[in-house]
Image (tube, rainbow, N blue to C red):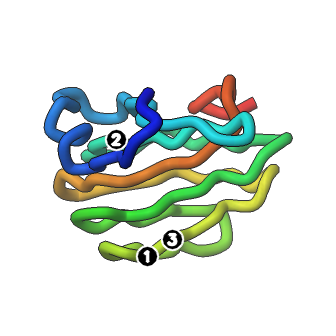
């Protein structure tokens, strides 16, 4: 990590695998991560933490049992703790995630 500014685009340029977040910074026990996604991720939930998504480029749909949320660049959605969900990207999408250090990506 660096004590200077964080260039998300530069970090994303080094990500070559979908659904493999890269930690680019840490603060207050949380990881700031960038990831490229495409296709469907597994249904999961986090019993002890909310799930933060910010779309940087592309389009992300987050499905939950009772609804779906569509996110475009610059938009953020927070899935409340305990809610089953799965993110889906029809085309490659770049997102930023923030979660407590040590959070299991596939949920509890």
For the C terminus, the quadrant is: top right
CB of mark 3 within 8 Å of CB of mark 1? yes
**Circle 1 — which element?**
loop
| Residue drawn at (45%, 31%) of the image | 23
User: Badge 1 local density, few (<14 within 10 Å), some, or many (20+)?
Assistant: some
Look at the numbered disc 2 and give the secondary structure of its residue.
strand
Q: Is 26 displayed left or right of 83 in the figure?
A: left
Q: Is residue 54 left or right of residue 65?
A: left
Q: Nearer the viewer, residue 42 or 1?
A: 1
Q: Where, by quadrant of the figure, is residue 80 drawn?
A: bottom right
2 or 3: tag closer to the N-terminus: 2
Quadrant holding the N terminus: top left
**Disc on res. 35:** 2
Check if mark 2's residue and mark 1's residue have beta carbons within 8 Å: no
Among numbered discs 2 and 1, the one appearing first in the sequence:
2
Is 6 or 105 nearer to us in this picture? Answer: 6
Circle 3 residue: 76
Q: Which residue is rendered at x = 68% and y = 23% of the image?
A: 102
The residue singled out by tag 1 in the image is: 75
Label 2 to label 1, Cα distance in Å? 15 Å
Q: Secondary structure at mark 3?
A: strand
- In the rendered structure, the answer to whether residue 68 lies left or right of residue 5 reads right
Assess disc 2: are there few (<14), some (14-19) or many (≥20) residues with their C-alpha within 10 Å of its C-alpha: many
Q: Residue at x 45, y 40 (%)?
A: 33
Residue at image point 84% right, 41% down: 48
Vertical relation: 83 (above or below) 21: below
């Amino acid at each position: 990590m660096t004590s200077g500014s964080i260039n998300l685009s530069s970090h994303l340029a080094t990500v070559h695998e979908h659904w493999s977040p890269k930690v680019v910074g840490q603060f207050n026990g949380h990881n700031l991560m960038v990831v490229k996604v495409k296709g469907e991720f597994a249904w999961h939930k986090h019993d002890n933490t909310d799930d933060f998504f910010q779309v940087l480029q592309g389009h992300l749909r987050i499905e939950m049992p009772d609804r779906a949320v569509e996110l475009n660049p610059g938009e953020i959605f927070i899935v409340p703790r305990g809610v089953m969900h799965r993110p889906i990207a029809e085309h490659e999408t770049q997102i930023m995630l923030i979660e407590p250090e040590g959070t299991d990506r596939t949920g509890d």
